[in-house]
Amino acid sequence: MHKLSLTAATICLAAQLTTAQIKLPSPSPGASVMQTIGTTDLTVTYSRPSLKGRQPFTDSYVPLGKVWRTGANSATNFTTTTDLMVNGKTLPAGTYAILSIPEDGNAILIFSKNKTVSEAEYKQAEDALRVNLTPSENSEKVETFTISFSDLTDSTAKMNFMWANVKASADLKVDVNANAAANVDKAVAEKPDDAAVLQAAASYNLSKGRNLDQSLGWIDKSIAKGENYRNLYVKSQILAKMGKYSDALPLAQKALTMGQSSNDGAFPFFKDGIEKSIADYTAKLPAAMPAMKAGKGKKKA
């Protein structure tokens, strides 16, 4: 009976080991690289094969002229949260599989709508975009296949593919102003009565000279929920941008007074700007408005 119990236990243990998800080292470990350009989030998820004495882009390993999954194991995935320009061509927001076709002196970079596609299953009809890349020689040998981002600005970057002594890069570009404007409109639509959102939205539009009438309506709603030196100053700037200096000046003066009497530790960062605006608005008022220029004017003796 004891022997039978041991045998049954052994069988159960063997079954558990057979079905268990055991995490073991992978010859081509997974990796993820993320980069934000402006307001656009980019993510690449891929597996990284190593050379291990092999030479890629030869007849025996990752041959020229053949579709390559641009990594190892499962498909390499690329996600962009907004529309993106890749080498001057538009890639709509979404998630794609990245494949490539290495060639002599050229490489074709492919974004496939089939996110799980393999080399054998690849169909050009499923392409969302394909662009040509010009490979160059790496100064140092890269043992493990690497995808990276570099040359970052607020609207552009390069996506680099490096392996062995070969490097190929794609130029990426986003319309950061259009994306930010869309985010502003979305935020106001979602929280139309939030004073802070309304102020931030009006301030952004002001910085871009965009939809000033709409911005004035937004900042008026923010002020109606509670005056503070910040929203008063934003309104004064919008009015000044519209050429209404006689309306802008008293608001800027009031913003300065409120800020000076507030306990807001951030006010010193605004103070110089408000004072400069007051001076600018005053200089642009007609000479026939001395009382306005003086703020409250002089008291009679």
Image (spheres, rainbow, N blue to C red):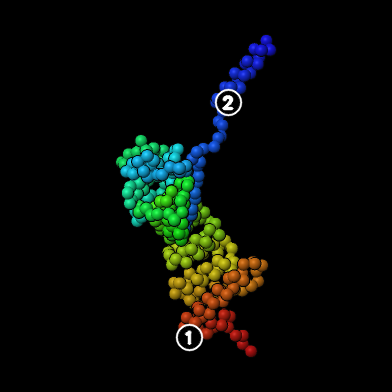
Identify which amino acid the numbered label 1 is placed on.
Ala
Q: Quadrant of residue 138?
A: bottom left
Image position, residue 275 (x, y; %): 56, 76
Asked if residue 97 can be seen in this view, the reply is no
Identity of the residue furthest to the front in this view: 53
Identity of the residue furthest to the top in this view: 1
Q: What residue do we see at 56% from left, 34% from top? A: 23
Quarter containing the C terminus: bottom right
Task: Residue under label 1, please give it.
Answer: 287
Task: Residue under label 2, please give it.
Answer: 17
Quarter containing the N terminus: top right
- Judge from the rendering whether residue 290 lies leftward or rightward of residue 139; answer left or right: right
Q: What residue do we see at 61% from left, 85% from top? A: 299
Image position, residue 252 (x, y; %): 55, 73
Q: Quadrant of residue 8?
A: top right
User: Could you tell me which secondary element the residue under label 1 belongs to?
Assistant: loop
2 or 1: tag closer to the N-terminus: 2
Estimate how packed mark 2 is, as few (under 14), some (14 to 19) or many (20 or more) residues with alpha carbons within 10 Å.
few
Q: What residue do we see at 46% from left, 46% from top? A: 145
Image position, residue 248 (x, y; %): 51, 74
